Amino acid sequence: MNSSIKPLLLGAMLLTPVFSSYAGQPVMSEVPRWDGGYGYQVFQERRESSQLMNGSFELANPNGLNYEKNITHIEGVYTWKKWIRATLKIPLVDQTRTVLDSQGNVITQRGTGNDDITLALPLKYYMNRPRSSGNFSFTPQVRFGGDDNDPYRISDGSTDFGASLSWEHETTDLVLGFGAGYWFESAAGKKDDWSLHTEVGWNFHERGSLRWETDYKKDPNKYLWLGSGPILAWNFNDTILARIEYKKELKAETYFPSSNGIGLTRGDVLRIGVGFVF
């Protein structure tokens, strides 16, 4: 291997995407909206990428470096009053990657365990009108307890505090939404990360909607990611809800100063989930 290229490719073993998804809340960011309501949801998420980049520049990948990440999201909610609730998110991760070791040999590493557990306290102000409804939300949250022991680390192991703001508006036909989240990193030497989210949708049935969502995520310690794609949401019987989500990677950059910014992008994201509310 060319000696000028090898140090760049070595950086890929240090930088593989780890980023919390947009802070949507269970169940399906919709219910329960009544006093004493509770529920849970399970989402299966898959990501993969073999796109190697140096900052915003795409690189050749002659060694076939790549990663695959499967996440089972287990999430629950309890609503004391319709305007105040508590949520819990536990992501269980199984991930593998093909990287270069310190001698330039291609090896495979695996990491299994839980990513950061998130506790949140969504506070909502509802706006109900004859032909529309909506809400503003402010959500303080904390993440902690992620596994950081495997060679392919799932989390940095720090405890971080954050908050998100969101706005949602819905009529019989139309769904609109916007959200922004920010995390204050407590790990030494790390910068804060943040995200933006937009959605527009069509209620094609009293129980179903088609939506288009776009997420912009920036972690100055790792990477930037812009993804967009469709969502199909369905309410079976006011107790069981389901969603299928896909987001295509539209723009990506990698940051990692100690290794010249070399890394794999986050890639496309597929999520399939079902939720139950009572």
Image (cartoon, helix red, strand yellow):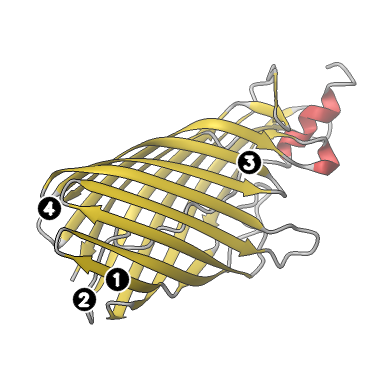
Q: Position of residue 6 (x, y in %)?
A: 83, 25
Query: Circle 3 — which element?
Result: strand
Q: Is residue 179 left or right of residue 158?
A: left
Count neighbours of disc 4 (C-alpha within 10 A) and say few if under 14, some if 14 to 19, many if 20 or more.
few
Of label 2 and label 1, which has the lower sequence position?
2
Distance between mark 3 and mark 4 Cα atoms: 36 Å
Distance between mark 2 and mark 1 Cα atoms: 12 Å
Q: Name the residue rendered at 67%, 66% in the picture.
A: 158
The amino acid marked with disc number 3 is Leu
Label 4, on which residue?
236
Q: Position of residue 69 (x, y in %)?
A: 51, 41
The amino acid marked with disc number 1 is Tyr
Distance between mark 1 and mark 4 Cα atoms: 24 Å
Query: Circle 4 — which element?
Result: loop
Q: Name the residue rendered at 72%, 49% in the picture.
A: 221
Query: Circle 1 — which element?
Result: strand
Distance between mark 2 and mark 4 Cα atoms: 19 Å
Nearest to the observer: residue 62 or residue 270: 270
Q: Is residue 55 visible?
A: yes
Of label 3 and label 4, which has the lower sequence position?
3
Of label 2 and label 4, which has the lower sequence position?
2
Q: Which mark is residue 201?
A: none
Label 2, on which residue?
34
Distance between mark 3 and mark 2 Cα atoms: 37 Å
Can you tell which quarter of the image residue 27 is in? Answer: bottom left
Label 3, on which residue?
224
The amino acid marked with disc number 4 is Phe
Can you tell which quarter of the image residue 65 is in? Answer: top right
Label 1, on which residue?
126
